[in-house]
Amino acid sequence: MEEQKAITSQWLEWAQKLQAIRQRRDAVRIAQNGLAYSKNQFDIERYNSLQNITAEIVSNYSELEHKQILDLFIGEVGYATPKVDIRGAVFRDNKILLVKERADGLWTLPGGWADVGESPSEAVVKEIWEESGYQTRALKLAAVYDRDKQGHTPFPFYCYKFFFLCELIGGSPSVSIETEEVGFFFEDNIPPLSIGRVTKAQIELMFEHYRHPALSTDFD
C-alpha cells in the first residue's frame, strides 16, 4: 500500500509539473522542437524542464539512470523527425536468418539504425553483414511501419521500420559486438523474439513475401 501511494504521488507530481508547462503528452518531441527554434529564454527554460521531467519518467520505469536518458535526449537536436530502423529478411532452405542480441539475449532480424549517407538498401546489406557475417543483396522493400502501431515495447523516440527481403550471396556465420549467435529457423520454430526490434507478426509477413514474391509492399 505504501509503495502504491508513493507511485501515485510521483505520477501526480509529474502531472502537475507538465500541466504547469502547458504542453501535450508527446513531451520528448515538443521539447526538442522547442529548443531547436525558440529564442525566448523563458521558453527555453520551460523546454529544458519538460525534457528533464520526461527523463525522470523514463528512468523511473526503466533500468537506465536519469542522466543517461537526459544525455540521450540532449543529444537529439534540430526538428524532431522519425528515426529509421532497417531490418533484413534473409532465407535459406525455407528458413529465416535471425541473430541473438547481446543486449537482451533474444532474437531478431539483423538490422539497426540507418546511417546518414547511405541508402536504405545499402544500410540493410551493411547491417546484415556486420551482425551475421552473411553477404546479401536487397531484393524488395517488403514493409514500412510506424513502430508505435506494431505492438513493440515502448521506446522514447518516434521510429519508422523498413523491412527488406534480401538474397543470400555469400559469407559465413559470424557474431559481432551486438550479436552473440546466428542461425536459420523454420517458421514453426522461431526462438524467443526481441519484441522491441521485431514481432512474430512481422516474421510471419516476411515468410509470406518469401513464398509469394509478387506481394506488394505492406505499410500502415
Image (tube, helix red, strand yellow):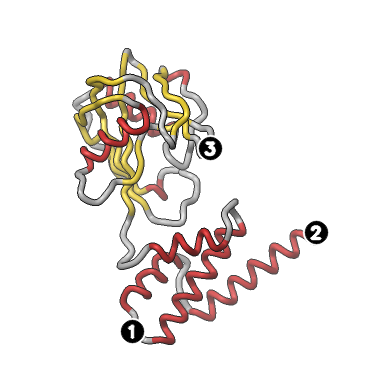
Residue ID at (33%, 24%): 207
User: Pointer 3: residues within 10 angstroms few (<14), some, or many (20+)?
Assistant: few
**Helix, strand or loop for disc 2:** loop
Q: Nearer the viewer, mark 2 or mark 3?
A: 3
Give the mark nearest the N terminus, 3 or 1: 1
| Gap in angstroms between the C-alphas marked 2 and 3 | 32 Å
Q: Pointers 2 and 1 in contact (CB under 8 A)?
A: no
Extreme-top residue of the structure:
93
The amino acid type of the residue labelled 2 equals Met
| Gap in angstroms between the C-alphas marked 3 and 1 | 42 Å
Residue ID at (43%, 86%): 42
User: Pointer 1: residues within 10 angstroms few (<14), some, or many (20+)?
Assistant: few
Q: Which residue is mark 2?
A: 1
The amino acid type of the residue labelled 1 equals Lys
Q: Which residue is mark 1?
A: 39
Q: Quadrant of residue 144?
A: top left
| Gap in angstroms between the C-alphas marked 2 and 1 | 46 Å
Q: Quadrant of residue 12?
A: bottom right
**Quadrant location, the N terminus:** bottom right
